[in-house]
Amino acid sequence: MKLWSYWRSSSAYRVRIALGLKGVDYEYQAVHLMRDGGQQHGQGFASLNPHRQVPVLEVEDGAQSVWLVQSMAIIEYLDERFPEPPLLPSSALDRAHVRALAELVNSGIQPLQNTGTFLELSRLGAETMPWAQHFVQKGLASLEKLAAPRAGAFLFGDRVSLADVYLVPQLYNARRFGVPLEAYPTLTRAEQNAQALPAFQRARPELQPDAEHSPPAP
């Protein structure tokens, strides 16, 4: 497998975690989202993902290569192809709950503070950091309330799940944007326990081949 990734992309971070949890080896292909006007806009990458976003995961289907896009689709593919350890619970209601936690991050927070959104805000003359802080805080407050009644060591019970795969990269972003996390004890407890697992440790942005110690401003 080959993963097109950017070290600081939270969407790619999720897929790196999932690959690690499943014990799947992969080749890392860096795509710099800021350099050269954004390498994701080059024709080579656009042929893999017309929406010009990371991650992209190349997998083999018989004798053919297939390029998967969108982190949720990629991670659920991995969960179906490599069923141990499962990232979704066994019951339909529990799966719906875990998916809701992940989707709150996936559609309710991350798109409002990603690189493309920031570039458009800057083009319109708006300040990006207050915008990001507002939507991250709003989303995390909702996530805390939704998760708390059924959380345990992790965001859902005492086993790592799809929800934790989405939580950890989002809290990484929250810290980047200067969002205080004291109001979210359920989230930070689950994050701490997840970060103790090797798969989460290996996926950390600063450990990726393309990591920058002094990254450019978003």
Image (cartoon, helix red, strand yellow):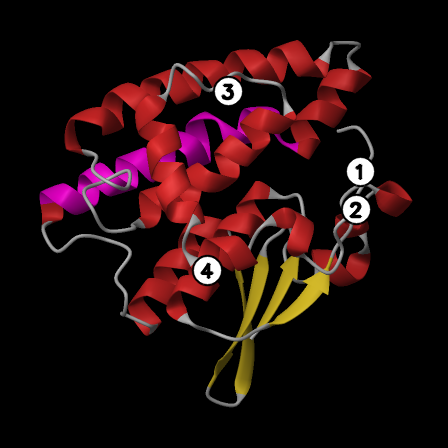
Which x, y percent locates residue 2? 61, 71
Q: Mark 2 — residue? A: 212
Which x, y percent locates residue 217? 80, 28
Residue in the picture at 59% in, 54% down:
55
Mark 4 → mark 3, Cα distance in angstroms: 25 Å
- Residue 122 can be seen, yes or no: yes
**Contact (CB < 8 A) between labels 1 and 2?**
yes
Above/below status of 56 relative to 6: below
Disc 1 or 3, which lies upstream in sequence? 3
Mark 1 → mark 3, Cα distance in angstroms: 21 Å
Q: Mark 3 — residue? A: 136
Tell me if mark 3 has few (under 14), some (14-19) or many (20+) residues whose alpha carbon lies within 10 angstroms of its own.
many
The amino acid pointed to by label 3 is Val
Mark 2 → mark 3, Cα distance in angstroms: 24 Å
Q: Mark 4 — residue? A: 199
| Of labels 1 and 3, the one closer to you | 1
Looking at the image, residue 31 sits to the left or right of residue 3; the answer is: right
- What are the residue bounds of the magenta stretch? 93-114
**Contact (CB < 8 A) between labels 4 and 3?**
no
Tell me if mark 4 has few (under 14), some (14-19) or many (20+) residues whose alpha carbon lies within 10 angstroms of its own.
some
Which x, y percent locates residue 83? 27, 70
Disc 2 or 3, which lies upstream in sequence? 3
The amino acid pointed to by label 4 is Ala
Front in this rendered view, residue 155 or 201: 201
Residue 22's quadrant in the figure?
bottom left
Tell me if mark 2 has few (under 14), some (14-19) or many (20+) residues whose alpha carbon lies within 10 angstroms of its own.
few
Mark 1 → mark 2, Cα distance in angstroms: 5 Å
Above/below status of 84 relative to 143: below
